[in-house]
Amino acid sequence: WILILDFGSQYTQLIARRVRELNVYCEIHPFNKDLATFADNPPNGVILSGGPSSVNDENAPNINEDIFNWDVPVLGICYGLQILAHNEISGSVEKADRREFGRSELIVDDNTDLLKEIPEESVVWMSHGDHIKELSSNYEVIAHTDNAHVAAVRHDEKPIYGVQFHPEVVHTVYGGQILQNFVYSICHLKGSWTAKSFIESTIEEIREKVGDDRVICGLSGGVDSTVVATLVHEAIGDQLQCIFVDNGVLRKNEFQDVLDIYEDQLHLPVKGIDASDKFLERLKGVVDPEMKRITIGETFIEVFDEAIAHDDSYKYLAQGTLYPDVIESISFKGPSATIKSHHNVGGLPEEMNLDLIEPVRELFKDEVRNVGRELGIPEHFIKRHPFPGPGLAIRIISDVDRPKLDILREADDIFISELRKNDLYDEVWQALAVLLPVQSVGVMGDERTYEFTIGLRAVTSVDGMTADWAHLPHPFLAHVSNRIINEVRGINRVVYDISSKPPSTIEWE
Ligand code: XMP
């Protein structure tokens, strides 16, 4: 496996994604991680990420030299290369006269190992302010650019390499090949880490851990919890019990539809609990978005707790924690502000004394989808857009009640079903309708109307962290608007949200 030591680059997760795409397992850890953690299972190679610091900064993050005791190949990327160079000759890295951001021409001087099969000239992506002025005689330059003389290096005795550019970004045309050379040829790893092998080993692990005990799992209707439940079910059969709660803020027919899929198609042992009255009672009069989240989170725990209260046979809680939530982040700027407290099913075990089973905690979202496919979860389920835990409550921009929910459900259903009908559903990352408390004047027939507004939002994104508004065809939007205004009582105006994230967010609350 590959250990990626993080020096704070915005691209660190991309490095991991690229390595995993080679079907090789990797983990990201902070640059200063205690390496004793890996004593039982040392990595077969180490990648040092880029980072925002300058090696000449007073508290510049440094390499733990102990990684060299493993005697495994090391690849430094950008800052990772500079810190290697700096540790050989202090002062060898300096501010560049011309900083390099964006595309650069890479000229290969030696294509025997790291740069095998890379053409003599190709486009690479740079993002650095410092450059290497002087290289210790232990290192040999194997590629250069016009601007940074040193673009790629190799140690002359040990399997240590460095690149100044970013092979992990798609703009580096042969970046994938370079990482493949490092992982396959230099670290001698085989691409044997696949969804299938993951499933086999995970099922085995779950079986061993759980023994004869019982496991409880909260389903959300999303991919992550469904994959987790299916994995656990494959492992221990009906020692698993799933719970799917109607929190009153699901979409039209969602509770029954999803419950049917769980039961009839996935054959999961699931108990549906209609707690909508309780949730809506608690949400009465709540306007503040964070208060809505907290209220729903707390009520969920209560309902979940009640459901298993008289049964102490449960020892484990299975949940769909993903790798991005687990990676220990290093922060050079201090804790970041809470924009939204994304409520998850997490937080349950502290209250409930259950041990956790988190079988996908080492996977990225797209890997969870692949595991789901391999497990036979239907494609239309795998491709469902993300839906927030607090549901429609954070899409009603005022207090929540049944009449408003009914209006929003109808509008949302028209939008989503039209996206599907017009083959646009898979083109967007997420699509939603929001109910705005703004009333405006309209005219229907000869009557004056004074009704609410529906906002439509559709975004393209890779991971939800950044997003652009989807440029849906105007005739399509016109058709959806028409249908909503004609068919949904209480709406006389439809607007389309054309904000990107940042500075906006995907949800309105
Ligand atoms: P934002 O609005 O923060 O949304 O740009 C990014 C993604 O997160 C979802 N989201 C949530 N998911 N609980 C969740 O489980 C929440 O409180 C929550 N708020 C936002 C949102 O739907 C989008 O996919």
Image (cartoon, rainbow, N blue to C red):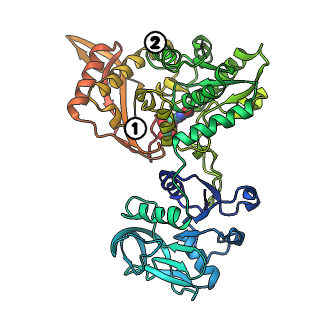
Label 1's element?
Answer: loop
- Mark 1 sits near ligand 1, with its Cβ under 8 Å away: yes
Q: Nearer the viewer, residue 362 or 304?
A: 362
Q: Is residue 432 visible?
A: yes
Q: Count of labels shown?
A: 2
Where is the N terminus found, in terms of image quarters?
bottom right
Label 2's element?
Answer: helix
| Residue identified by numbered label 2 | 403
Query: Where is residue 432 drawn, in percent x and y?
Result: 40, 29
Horizontally, is 167 left or right of 298 in the view?
left
Query: Where is residue 273 drawn, in percent x and y?
Result: 61, 13
Q: Nearer the viewer, residue 385 or 458?
A: 385
Q: Nearer the viewer, residue 222 or 198?
A: 198
To which quarter of the image does residue 458 belong? top left
Query: Where is residue 402 drawn, in percent x and y?
Result: 49, 12
| Residue identified by numbered label 1 | 429
